[in-house]
Amino acid sequence: MSNFIETFRGRVTPQECDHLGHMNVQFYMAKVSDAAWTVMHAIGMTPDYIRTRRKALAAVRQDVSYLRELKAGDLVVIESGVLEAGETKVTIYHRMNNVETGILTMTAKVLTVNMDLDKRRAEPLAPEIRERAQAYRVREEGA
Amino acid sequence: MKQPQVAYRGCVNAWECDQWGHQNVQFYLSKASDAQAALCAAMGLPPSYFRQTRRAVLPVADRILFQRELRAGDILAIRSGVRSLDPAGTLRFFSAMRNEDTGGSAAFFETQARLTDLTCGAQIPWPEPVMERAAALAGPFSDIPPPPDITGPRAPGRIAEGLVLTYRGSVESWECDETETVPPCFHIARFAECANQLFRHLGIAKGTLRAQNMGTAALDYDILYRIPVRVGQTVEIKSGLLEVREKVFRFFHHLLDSVSGEILTSIEVAAVFFDLTARKSVPAPEAVRANAQRLLAASGVI
């Protein structure tokens, strides 16, 4: 059974398209960023956890493959999972598909760290978060 | 029993929140429009269909209940379902926005839309396969009933002399979507802006509200999209008051074409003042009551 979970479902707007006639790269990342909040929720970093415990995952490195262009009006869905959960780091994997064609349009591997929002530095993950992250382990496309 | 499908999934970003610390109304609408597009695709009208035909599913009426505020970092989903696709060509559907962390309802949309030819602006019949798909998707969804009817005075369908001019401007290309018309979210952005002008006529300024630790929040929208709004049009908004209850106050806006004077879009709004700390509604400030009668008379309501 796949551990991927749906983390974003939406649409490409004309405002997100550039003069090349397709969605500009920054908006792939905007959607990945939106998807990340649902990943955090799944592993126990709920909105309430982030507000009260003052800890959240912050991206420090991204490895993105833009596989197909997207045009205004296209519907997209992102599914996500965890590649690795270490002492302070969680590597999240996102894959974006065009809903109409089913074609894979982007993959992103995002290395994140558990950031203390007051100290503004990385700290070890709470054991329960790390444990829950293991339940969403996935493999990269083609890996 | 039929279940509504997840038609949107996302989150609330900090830049979608306004000075009152919650997601601004226009972003409820932009997310609901994404959900509408997903529902159309499920009915057999994917994005490629619209590109090839220069047709669009344009909303004609929208009733929106704002049930709970959403804050930056909240995650949400919209579940949509088809109520009916009647022979006259009106698609009726709902979209329920839920906070996926708490499970609480955040907003509810009951929408009517029509298939429109963008070249001539005429309503056109739905293709037969779409009618069949819609019929297969449609259900009574009796556990998700439509919103109750609005009680109290309704907005007059004419422009009374005493309505307040609350906006004047033009429609820019970046406000339009792939249908080359203004989508609901940009209507709402304008209406939200001009509400502050109306408040000024009610004797309240934003600074005064902030000093009293008060904000405003919308509860209920009833929108009629009468004529699609297109790029380059010069438009204005005239607004009036409908009623002031103890906590809830109701007002309306008509978006007009400045040249023809035609009403393009109308919205009735029910809203409350709320305490920014307790996040609870409070009675309308005294100044609102004092000015209400004057504005009600000018609005052509009484």
Image (cartoon, coloured by chain):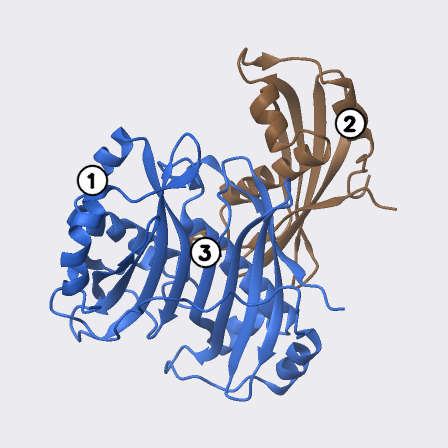
Q: In the depicted view, which residue is nearer to us: B42 or A25?
A: B42
Disc 2 element: strand
* Position of the C terminus of chain A by quadrant: top right
Q: What chain does badge 1 belong to?
A: B
Q: What is the letter of the brown chain?
A: A
Say what amino acid the circle numbered 2 marks. Glu
Residue that badge 3 annotates: B29
Q: Position of residue B1 (x, y in %)?
A: 76, 68
Say what amino acid the circle numbered 3 marks. Leu
Which numbered disc covers residue B205? 1
> Residue placed at 60% from the left, 46% from the top?
B104
Residue A125 visible: yes
Closer to the observer: label 2 or label 3? 3
Q: What is the letter of the blue chain?
A: B
Q: What chain does badge 2 belong to?
A: A
Residue that badge 2 annotates: A84
- Up the image or down, B44 lies above or below B169; here it is below
Q: In the depicted view, which residue is nearer to us: B85 or B257?
A: B85
How far apart in space, not on screen, are marks 2 and 3 (Cα)?
37 Å
Earlier along the polypeptide chain: callout 1 or callout 3?
3
Q: Position of residue A57 (x, y in %)?
A: 63, 25
Q: Position of residue B300 (x, y in %)?
A: 18, 69
Which numbered disc covers residue B260? none
Q: Is disc 1 on the same chain as disc 2?
A: no
> Residue placed at 61% from the left, 71% from the top?
B82
Disc 1 element: loop
Q: What chain does badge 3 belong to?
A: B
Q: In the depicted view, which residue is nearer to us: B18 or B103?
A: B103
How far apart in space, not on screen, are marks 1 and 3 (Cα)?
26 Å
